[in-house]
Amino acid sequence: MSNTKPSIPGGSAEPHGEKRRTQRVHISMPVVIKGVLEGDNLKEETQTISVNAFGGLLRIAADVKRGQKILLYNARTQEEILCTVIFVGQKEGAKTQVGFEFAQASPLFWRIAFPPEDWDPAERKLPTGAAKPSSPAPKSTSDGGKSR
């Protein structure tokens, strides 16, 4: 039995039919992975590819295994959280995509807001004072808008 699931470019890491519990946010955040790997201390600086309230995805050079416990240090907030490696992709160059899950849901760990699944960036609120797109104004007629 292998600890590696196939990596599908641009695809998701989970099997078909599984639905993500919270919206994934594609963001590069500086983190440090810490742990013990085959008796040696593991410490690697990297950046996230995407995050959610339950964990995230990143690329690292270390050869970790599914089920392995790691500590994830958020360089921006100086917070650390216990995680489990839940996905190990194919090695691409010197690094491998690794999915991790927090020991318990921690949406505040990233200090970002997670949009809902059906969020459409085109529908976001416009800044105050910005012109809103509207339908064309009705044409005026020469008889003051009265038509016969």
Image: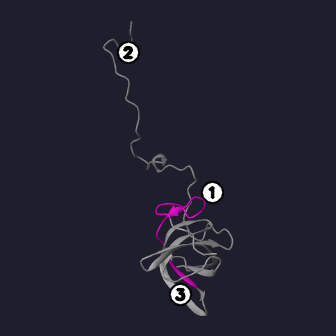
At label 3, counting other C-alpha atoms closer than 10 Å, the crowd grade (few under 14, some 14-19, many 20 or more) is: some
Which kind of residue does numbered mark 1 sit on?
Lys
The residue wearing badge 1 is: 19
Q: Residue 98, image x and y in percent?
A: 54, 74
Q: Residue 134, image x and y in percent?
A: 41, 35
- 142 versus 13 height, above or below: above
Give the quadrant of residue 135.
top left
Numbered range of the magenta stretch: 8-34
Cα–Cα gap, marks 1 and 2: 55 Å
- 54 versus 75 height, above or below: above
Magenta region includes residue 100: no
At label 1, counting other C-alpha atoms closer than 10 Å, the crowd grade (few under 14, some 14-19, many 20 or more) is: few
Which kind of residue does numbered mark 2 sit on?
Gly
> SS at mark 1?
loop
Q: Which mark is residue 145?
A: 2
Decide which of tag 1 and tag 2 comes sooner along the chain.
1
The residue wearing badge 3 is: 43
Q: Residue 6, image x and y in percent?
A: 54, 68
